[in-house]
Structures are given as C-alpha cells and as structure tokens.
Image (spheres, rainbow, N blue to C red):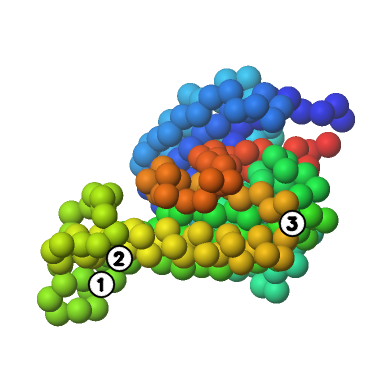
Amino acid sequence: MAAIKHTLVVDAGNTLIKLAHFNGNELASLHVLPLIDVSNITAHLHNASVAIISSVSVDSNLIQKLLAPLPCLIFSAHTPLPFINDYETPQTLGADRLAGIAGAKARHPDKPVLVIDSGTCVTYDLLTADGHYQGGAISPGLHMRLRAMQTFTQRLPLPEWQIPEQITGKNTAACLLAGAYFGLIDEINGRISRYEETYRELQTLLCGGNAGILQKQLKNNIFAAPNLVLEGLNQILHYNVK
C-alpha cells in the first residue's frame, strides 16, 4: 500500500475531543469539541483517508461507527509502537504518555528524549537513543498541589491562581502560590539535570495544559511542543498502516 498522506487523529479526553488533520507529518488543522458534542465529529472528516482513535472517555467503537466508512485504528495497549516498550506493566500506561514518546522520537530520532507533560499530574517519560522506552515518573500537578494543601489542612485556603512574582511570599496566599509554582519549577529543572548527567545530547520536550506558564522559568534547552500527543498518535497511525 502506498504511504498515507491525509490522516485524522481523534483524541477524546475527559472533557474535550481534539480532531487533528495531518498532511504527512504536518499538522494541517485542529478542532476542539466539547465531549457532549461527540456526534458532531462527522462534520470534520474532510479528505482524511484513515483515522486513529484514542479515547479515555467515549467508547472508541462508538467513535468508529460515527466515522464510518473511514478506516480507523483504535489505539490500545496492544497497538504496535514505533519504539521498544520496556515498561514492566504496559497495560497500565496512559495512551498520552505513549503518544508523547512517539511524537518525540519522530522529532529527535537517534537521540535520548525526555517528555514532560504538565497537566493535572506531571509525567516524565524517557526514551533512549536506541529507541527503548524506559518509563519515568508521575508527580502532582500545579493545581493539585494547591488543592492538596487546602484539603489536608485545617486552615490553609485555596488561593486564587496567579503566577507568583516572587519566590518569597509576603502573605499566606502568596506563600502557597510560591511554594506550588516554584516548587514544581525546581522539581522539573532538577529532574532534567539528573537525566542529563546520564544521557548525553538529551532532548527535552514540554507539553500539557500548564506548559505555557512553566516554560519561562525552566532551563533554556527545553522545547515547548503543545501538540506532541497528537503528533505521536499520527506517527503511530503511520507505523501501523503501511
């Protein structure tokens, strides 16, 4: 079969559905729909010749029926990947972590890559230069840290979010914001430094909902890749449809 060119990536999260069209490896368009509007995805088929579905919410088979007769690949723990997965429990791995690694490998083939996805939780995922996925780490995200301090104490409030201007807070709300924000910044920078000690030419990619408010405080060699998961799903689709 000739190499596919026009592809559709459907990424259904807990509240939103992302519909990304790719021409080869290039993102051509991106549409975001509320989860309740899943039936409207049929309006975004355009000229796609094949699709990949990744969903943590809506039944993937329902999405496949909505896209019919477009051929679809449903992404699961059993889907072949364009790298070697050395994770001990691959069935427990989130699809977004695997897709992020696939996207990072396409951007930086033959180099070690660290993918940092900063959302509700912060995930760290490492791929070696020879294409072996090693796993990584999961830690509380920015807003989870603030909510945890309010939940598990008697008197600490949940401050209104804003980026703290100083590392030293002058009141309780400012102290909470500084602790959560700069604490996460120091964590990320520290983990990158640890990996750089072992992996020469490490490439670090940052994605996730909080990437924009973290990037300016992080090490200079970090590259923001907001659509990395979508890029990775497209790579997985190309890998499986040949």
Report helix, strand or loop for mark 1. helix
Q: Which mark is residue 149?
A: 1
- Pointers 1 and 2 in contact (C-beta within 8 Å): yes
> Which residue is disc 2 drawn over?
179
Tell me if residue 232 can be seen. yes
Give neighbour class at mark 3: few <14, some 14-19, many 20+ (Cα, 10 Å): few
Which amino acid is tagged 1? Met
Q: In the picture provided, is 72 more to the left or to the right than 46?
A: right
Q: How far apart are marks 1 and 3 (CA)?
A: 37 Å
Nearest the camera: 228 or 45? 228
Mark positioned earlier in the residue sequence (2 or 3): 2
Q: Name the residue under label 3.
A: 200
Q: Residue at x 12, y 76 (%)?
A: 155
What amino acid is at disc 2?
Gly
Residue 61 appears in the rendering: no
Label 1 vs label 2: CA separation?
10 Å
Mark 1: give few (<14), some (14-19) or many (20+) Cα within 10 Å: some
Q: Where is residue 216 in the image (x, y as percent from the top left)?
A: 42, 44
